[in-house]
Image: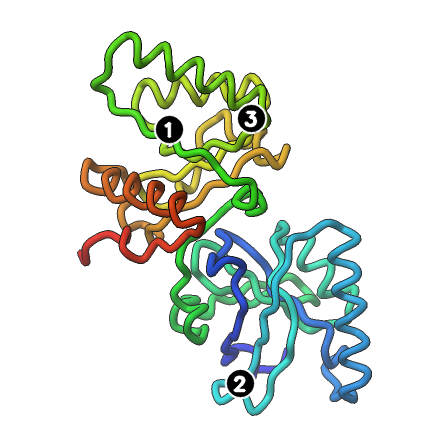
Amino acid sequence: MNPAYAQARFRAELPRGALPVAFGVVTAWNPDGRDASAAENETANARLRTALEKAGHFHFPVTGGSADFAHAEPGFGIVADRGACLALGREFRQEAIFWIARGTVHLISCADASIHTLGEWRTLAEAPASHPDFHFQGNLALLDRAPQPFLMSSRCTAQQVLDAYAWARTQCDTGGTVMSGFHSPVECDVFQILTRRGANLIWVPGRDIPKVIPAAMPKLLAQNRLLVASPFDYGKPDRPTRATCLRRNEWIARAVSVGELSLTSASPEPG
């Protein structure tokens, strides 16, 4: 494998300024390590894009290159499992692909699947992609559906609880998408209603995206009914606190009111 791969840097057009929890970076340029013509490379990359669309893999533009980008190879960030990304690298006759998981960049050989850790995305990628607005897992397209925020304190009256349950059923009946921390007892009850009745959900935890998500959620991810979005960096914080939940709630309210997700002010305090 060309040792230059270990010195790679990245430029990316992040979707909505957000970085997936895990994704591969694959290009079709310069197959078999040879210098192909620009026309050949562009045709190959077009074939790769078509393959991604046919397979239904969410993707976005990523260019890998040398530190000064004197050499650069356009490709794609691909939200798929590692095996699928590696198979694409082999199909398009690449020596290696990159695999980014929870912000750490790995180089994977297409020949023997050996893995080498290169460093952190935030140091190997150029701004603004190096500092994503938020991290996500699941169906990012749910943000296009005018999500309805649901935030409810643990301190509420019996009538407010009943009203919340009725509201949740209405969201299901109208095909709504609900954004919440699903943290307080009533929010958890509403989560169960929404899950059973087929609604779409956007879960914004008051912490980074957990490595292991709650038991009910993998099925929702497989059904494209769930988006997990977090304004916090990995491991900071690793559990919700009163302060982080407050920041999370403020972010949800602001994001819905302005119709966009910009999480910088919801970031945790240093340390």
- Mark 3 vs mark 2: which is more N-terminal? 2
Q: Residues within 10 Å of mark 1 (few under 14, many from 20)?
A: many
Q: Residues within 10 Å of mark 3 (few under 14, many from 20)?
A: many
The residue pinned by badge 3 equals: 199
Q: Residue 25 location, x and y as percent?
A: 60, 65
In the rendered structure, which amino acid carries the disc numbered 3?
Ala
Could you tell me which quadrant the C terminus lies in?
bottom left
Residue type for callout 1: Phe
Disc 1 vs disc 3: which is toward the camera?
Answer: 3
Q: CA distance from mark 2 to mark 1?
A: 43 Å
Q: Is residue 83 left or right of residue 51?
A: left
Q: Earlier in the sequence, mark 2 or mark 1?
A: 2
Residue at left 40%, top 43%?
256
Residue 267: x and y in percent read 27, 53
Asked if 168 appears above or below 254 in the picture, the reply is: above
Q: Outermost residue, front direction? A: 257
Is residue 264 something that shows in the picture?
Answer: yes
Residue 109 appears in the rendering: no
The percent position of residue 79, horizontal first and vertical second, equals 61, 53
Q: Determine which residue is flagged by label 1.
A: 182
Q: Is residue 204 above or below residue 12?
A: above
Q: Is 233 in front, or is 112?
A: 233
Element type where label 1 sits in the image: loop
Sooner in the amino-acid sequence: mark 1 or mark 3: 1
Report if the CB atoms under discs 3 and 2 are less than 8 Å apart.
Answer: no
Question: Mark 2 belongs to which amino acid?
Answer: Ser
